Amino acid sequence: MRPSFCSRLTRLGLALAVLLGIVYGLAPLLLNSFAPLRAYDQIVRETDIIPGVLFYSEVPQTRDAEMNNRDSIRYR
């Protein structure tokens, strides 16, 4: 027997609420309480690198290459 539309919609709403709670509640709490994450956050904010673009953004050569690449595209 398939669950009713209302129960599926309720489960979807609960899943979205849990996801938003993790993203906007738990993640910032962990970021503020864990020193290596604070350092990583500071590096990302200072260099304006999107973390999803490059995985190894803490390697100086990669970070410099990304910043140079962005500058060359920006100042075309």
Image (tube, rainbow, N blue to C red):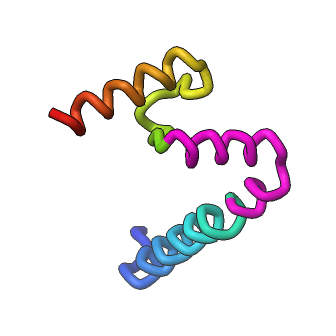
Percent of width and height locating residue 41: 65, 47
Percent of width and height locating residue 6: 41, 84
Quadrant of res 25:
bottom right
Toward the bottom, the furthest residue is 6
Q: Residue at x 79, y 39 (%)?
A: 36
Query: Which residue is nearer to you in this view: 6 or 39?
Result: 39
Toward the top, the furthest residue is 61
Tell me the quarter of the image containing the C terminus. Answer: top left
Tell me the quarter of the image containing the N terminus. Answer: bottom left
Q: Residue at x 45, y 38 (%)?
A: 52
Q: Is residue 65 above or below residue 50?
A: above
Percent of width and height locating residue 14: 55, 75
* Count of labels in the image: 0
Query: Which residue is nearer to you in this view: 7 or 21?
Result: 21
Q: Residue at x 52, y 27 (%)?
A: 55
Residue 23 lies within the magenta run: no
Q: Is residue 62 above or below residue 11?
A: above
Dominant secondary structure of the magenta stretch?
A: helix
Q: Would residue 65 be found to the left or right of residue 14 on screen?
A: left
Q: Is residue 74 above or below residue 12?
A: above
Percent of width and height locating residue 22: 64, 63
Toward the front, the furthest residue is 75
Q: Is residue 71 above or below residue 42?
A: above
Residue 32 lies within the magenta run: yes
Q: Which stretch is magenta?
A: 28-47
Q: Would residue 76 be found to the left or right of residue 36 on screen?
A: left
Quadrant of res 46:
top right
